[in-house]
């Protein structure tokens, strides 16, 4: 994993697909089967880049935003059991599907580290190249508000972009996209396609996606989860909402061009695929007048320092133990 692979010739045109889909809530095997089906379906339409939503395997912890805290402990246990290890058998199967589809696949997952016996989960975005190789694992660096009772904080090791068959790809998770320095780091790596995965369906999210496209002079592929309580009307972890709160995530997946114009989507309140052919020569054309990480930058005034080293809690704990008990 990572960005150390040599860069291949980047294509001028890419067919991108934001796959707006609902998980089979807290059911890993069923959601994984759905993932593989959607990859094959998108491949049949010619998609070369497929972006799945945030926390798709195997569902976002919606109960955090309800009004019944009594269920949170047991709900977390079920979320942990429906999460995946990275790498693991589930990532192998997704990689095989990406290779069969000859497509780059990005997907949001709940990641666990069961080998270490820890309960911490991570909100993670995985990138598989078209040969099936897992080339990037990005853990959300700052869980949003109540998410901090579920997810641990990622480190900077997942921020570097990866060389893929569709060019250099990075990507941020949900409200990480509101972090100006995280966005700038993506632009500075020369990404021509910015990917954003989310469960946010607010108007400000679409405004942000258009801002990123215009600011970075890049295409933006934003994939959102769509999820309603009527899919699992009697689920014990989704009862803490008002009776009229059905759609907990309305979707709204979009694709935006380097000028900030929405060219595909939004898709609301249903599963589907938002697709567009991206003419990547428009990125260079757009940067003729504005390149915030190039000629429009002022590195003599502004500098950004990024720590991309991997932080290991296990090694840190072991080190402390050795110091205390030589």
Image: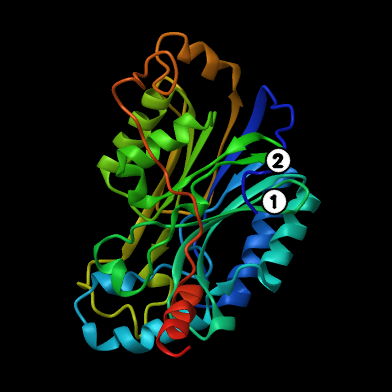
Which residue lies at the image location 73% right of the left edge and 66% below the top edge?
93
Which residue lies at the image location 67% right of the left edge and 35% below the top edge?
166
Mark 1 crowdedness (10 Å alpha carbons): few <14, some 14-19, many ≥20 = some
Secondary structure state at the residue bearing disc 2: loop
Left/right of residue 87 with respect to residue 272 in the rendered view? right
How does the figure colour the protein chain or chains?
Answer: rainbow
Q: Is residue 255 among the parts visible in the rendering?
A: no
Left/right of residue 96 with respect to residue 81 in the rendered view? right
Question: Against 288, is 169 above or below?
Answer: below
Q: Which residue is mark 1?
A: 41
- Give the x, y percent position of residue 237: 34, 82
Of the 4 image quadrants, the one containing the N terminus is bottom right
Nearest the eye: 39 or 84: 84
Nearest the eye: 20 or 186: 186
Q: Which numbered circle lies on residue 131?
A: none
Question: Against 48, is 216 above or below?
Answer: above
Q: Which residue is mark 2?
A: 45
- Give the x, y percent position of residue 159: 49, 47
**Residue farthest top in this picture:** 289
Rounded to the nearest whole Å, what is the CA distance between mark 1 and mark 2? Answer: 7 Å
Residue 192 image-quadrant placement: top right
Mark 2 crowdedness (10 Å alpha carbons): few <14, some 14-19, many ≥20 = few
- Give the x, y percent position of residue 172: 44, 47
Left/right of residue 176 with respect to residue 258 in the rendered view? left
Question: Against 55, is 186 above or below?
Answer: above
- Give the x, y percent position of residue 36: 69, 61
Which residue lies at the image location 70% right of the left edge and 42% below the top edge?
5
Question: Against 297, is 197 above or below?
Answer: below
Q: Are marks 1 and 2 in contact (CB under 8 Å)?
A: yes
Give the total number of marks visible in the rendering. 2
């Amino acid at each position: 994993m990572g960005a150390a692979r040599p860069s291949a010739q980047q294509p001028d045109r890419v067919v991108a697909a934001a796959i707006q889909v609902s998980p089979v809530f807290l059911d890993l095997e069923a959601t994984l089967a759905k993932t593989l089906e959607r990859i094959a379906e998108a491949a049949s339409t010619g998609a070369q880049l497929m972006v799945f939503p945030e926390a798709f395997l195997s569902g976002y912890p919606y109960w955090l935003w309800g009004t019944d805290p009594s269920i949170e402990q047991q709900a977390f246990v079920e979320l942990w059991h429906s999460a995946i290890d990275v790498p693991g058998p589930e990532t192998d199967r997704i990689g095989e599907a990406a290779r069969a589809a000859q497509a780059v696949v990005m997907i949001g997952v709940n990641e666990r580290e069961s080998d270490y016996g820890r309960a911490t989960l991570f909100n993670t975005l995985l990138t598989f190249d078209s040969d099936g190789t897992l080339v990037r694992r990005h853990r959300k660096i700052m869980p949003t508000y109540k998410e901090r009772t579920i997810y641990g904080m990622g480190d900077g090791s997942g921020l570097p972009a990866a060389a893929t068959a569709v060019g250099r790809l990075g990507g941020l998770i949900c409200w990480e996209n509101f972090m100006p320095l995280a966005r700038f780091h993506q632009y500075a790596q020369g990404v021509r396609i910015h990917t954003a995965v989310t469960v946010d369906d607010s108007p400000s999210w679409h405004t942000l996606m258009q801002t990123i496209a215009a600011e970075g002079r890049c295409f933006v592929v934003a994939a959102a989860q769509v999820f309603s309580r009527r899919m699992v009307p009697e689920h014990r972890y989704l009862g803490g909402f008002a009776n009229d709160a059905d759609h907990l995530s309305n979707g709204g997946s979009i694709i935006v061009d380097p000028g900030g114009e929405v060219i595909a989507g939004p898709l609301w309140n249903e599963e589907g695929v938002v697709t567009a052919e991206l003419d990547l020569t428009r990125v260079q054309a757009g940067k003729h007048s504005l390149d915030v990480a190039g000629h429009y930058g002022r590195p003599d005034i502004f500098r950004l320092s990024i720590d991309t080293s991997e932080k290991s809690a296990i090694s840190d704990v072991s080190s402390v133990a050795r110091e205390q008990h030589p």
